[in-house]
Image: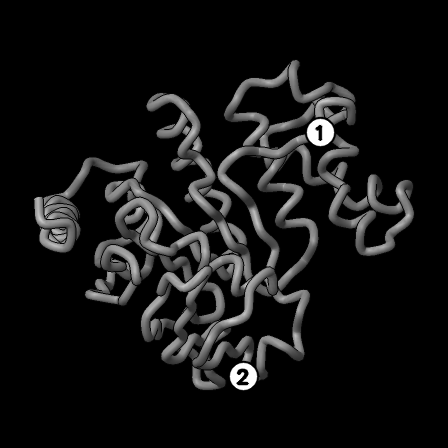
Amino acid sequence: MTASGPALEMTRVSLTLGGTPVLDDISLHVARGEFVSILGPSGSGKSSLFRLLTGALAPDRGGIRVNGAPLSAQPQAFAFMPQRDALMPWRRIVDNVILGLEVQGMDRAEARAKVLPLFATFGLEGFARHYPAQLSGGMRQRAALLRTIVQDRPIQLLDEPFGALDALTRAGMQRWLEQRWQAAHWTTLLVTHDVREAVALSDRIYVFSPRPARVVAAFDVPGPRPRLARPFTAEAARLEAELLDTLLTQTGD
């Protein structure tokens, strides 16, 4: 954490939906410019946590603060990228990318002028006027991430962003994201089921229990970056094994 406090801090947050406890006494933090991941079994409440942060749900108890202030005072603190790219098939890529800016009230011409210079950085140069069906899965995910980033929100929420991709495309996207993050240091919270992805991308990893989710462990990730551009280290292998063991202990396997 920085001296001025974390970008995001959740303190003893609990949530019940339809009489079912979903989150139980969750406490975690994300420092400015930090990449933090959440690992946990399917159905453990990871995505429900994101719904709390985006304001779709309200906690039963506990506190959520962004840059030191209550979340209720900063409803636009988060930009959210779902697992599927959610691109509108009838809109060209540039108009999909600017959708969040238009929702915020920005003029379409102004929004296009803002995003087009970024297309090369995101590996999309020459594809602004294409439709989603004309792009590969990896390129669509890059467009979805660009749509998320250009909203200039303090914190990026990534919900299994590469989970629907094939293994080769997913590995390429992980390496690409690591490069982009190193250049920009976006404050990022990632939900993933992929232990190796979490180890490769994160500064810190929280492990959730099965529902109702509790934080059962937190791991700082050692080693220099970039990690995906070099051989898998023994240190990373040990951390991956410890994470897997922690997850299997929670599920009883």
97 displayed left or right of 24: right
Point out residue 38 in the picture as x, y percentages from the top left corner: 34, 56
Point out residue 51 in the picture as x, y percentages from the top left corner: 53, 58
Mark 1 crowdedness (10 Å alpha carbons): few <14, some 14-19, many ≥20:
some
Image colouring: one colour
Tell which circle, 1 or 2, labels the residue nearer the N-terminal end: 2
Of discs 1 and 2, which sits in the foreground? 1
Quadrant containing the N terminus in the rendered view: bottom left
Q: How many marks?
A: 2
Point out residue 219 in the picture as x, y percentages from the top left corner: 22, 63
Point out residue 101 in the picture as x, y percentages from the top left corner: 78, 50
Residue 79, compared with residue 61, is above or below; it is: above
To which residue does mark 1 refer? Answer: 88
- Tell me how far mark 1 sits from mark 2, CA to CA: 36 Å
To which residue does mark 2 refer? Answer: 68
Amino acid type of disc 1?
A: Met
Q: Residue at x 35, y 29 (%)?
A: 171
